[in-house]
Image (cartoon, helix red, strand yellow):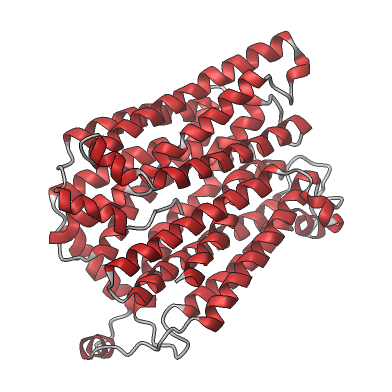
Amino acid sequence: MVAVSSIAAGIQFGWALQLSLLTPYVQTLGVPHAWASFIWLCGPISGLLVQPIVGYSSDRCQSPFGRRRPFILTGALAVAVAIILIGYAADIGQLAGDDITQKTRPRAVAVFVVGFWILDVANNMLQGPCRAFLGDLAAGDQKKTRTANGFFSFFMAVGNVLGYAAGSYDGLHKLFPFTETEACNVFCANLKSCFFFSIVLLLALCIIVLTCVNDPQYIPSNQEKEAEEAGKTHVSCFMGELCVAFKELKRPMWMLMLVTAINWVAWFPYVLFDTDWMGREVYGGDVGEKAYNSGVHAGSLGLMLNSVVLAVMSLGVEPLGRLVGGVKWLWAIVNVILAACMALTVLITKKAEQQRALNPALIGDPSMEVKGGAMAFFSVLGIPLAVTYSVPFALASIYSSSSGAGQCLSLGLLNVAIVIPQMIVSAISGPWDAWFGGGNLPAFVLGAVAAALSAIPAVVLLPTPKKDDEAKLSSLSMGSFH
């Protein structure tokens, strides 16, 4: 269980780098800020399609290598390929004919986008089978299930901290001098170096699991054999179950999906633009400038603090829920905190701009007051993020217990309520910012409004779970954004 759970550290290490550095990086290749968010459409699309289909197929895989290990191996190799494509996009683009003196390098952007999409698909291929593998090892034992989920959450936090720490350090490229090339500047070279560590960590952890953890061959039941003989594919069977699950959803589950969807409209601008906001608005730099790069690295440090708070807070979700009168009240309270934090970005930005106007020397090195406010913003957001990563999944398990769809498929339905808002925000946030004069504040203000709105239906529309049902919080693993 420890070995399988440790793969979460490798996945989250790369994901932390993706969240903190890739939006700034793609802008160095010439993609305008208003269009950078479109690249992130791959995440919710792959989450909507790949993860549930891979999970369903993994459950029925008859390979002699086991049900889970073939998908873990394929996912790990795909991550390695994707990371190489992303890290070397600028160099490959130059070899393919890009003029590096021009602001936009279309061939490099094309290579980056291909690598980015492969990376998201691969991450989704890894995460589902790993979670299912833990369920196989627990064999229905509730104590073992809680232990396994605790391990998984712990290693997710470890991966986040390591990834954001690596992203916050701007001298990592010195360990690999060959990473800095004519087409790849210091920021790009640091990204390559971070990804080297990510590949080594993930592959090492996967090799341990593939060689040391037993995964018995799956033997299908007679009913499944009959379905195969009738010509039904895994995808068609999955879609059939999904349609039945949607048809039989009860009102509480629909309300939960509504609240979750509004809540993720609030979260996704932060996911997209957190480090870009630090580079542009807080540190006052433009893409490619030293001030901007310093802000991005400071944003990665803020995300590391966010992960530490998230890890600590995840241990207190259940007792805090009891303290405030139930988990739905806790969710509503932290959504108000989220709204306040997103609104706080306006105050931090205006303060930084005022100080730079009075003292241009603060460009790239804001005052301690501004830095402290920004770090507090990242840190405090770890509190609502811990609740967002646990409470909706626990409520989905509780509300769907009478639908007959099963917990895994019910969580897949909740995933639909997460990824569709992400697709919408990815599509509109860049143009939305451009309509209001550029920068990241318009998207953050939209997030603040959505967070405040999601607090109301969380209390008014969601049924209050029974006390016995709320105990499920302790047996569910911490979720994540993918």
Q: Could you tell me residue 148's position as x and y percent? A: 39, 66
Q: Could you tell me residue 375's position as x and y percent? A: 58, 30
Residue found 25% across the figure and 36% down from its top: 323
Q: Could you tell me residue 232's position as x and y percent? A: 28, 82
- Pick the front one: 82 or 466: 466
Q: Is residue 60 above or below residue 453?
A: below
Q: Is residue 440 above or below residue 205?
A: above
- Pick the front one: 142 or 425: 142
On the question of residue 179 being in view, the answer is no
Left or right: where 94 falls relative to 153: right
State which quadrant residue 264 falls in.
top left
Q: Is residue 118 above or below residue 279?
A: below
Residue found 33% across the figure and 77% down from its top: 234
Left or right: where 436 falls relative to 168: left
Left or right: where 293 falls relative to 438: right
On the question of residue 225 being in view, the answer is yes
Left or right: where 347 falls relative to 179: left
Residue found 30% across the figure and 52% down from its top: 393
Q: Could you tell me residue 67's position as x and y percent? A: 41, 81
Residue found 34% across the figure and 81% down from its top: 60
Q: Is residue 474 above or below residue 199?
A: above
For the N terminus, give its image quadrant: bottom left
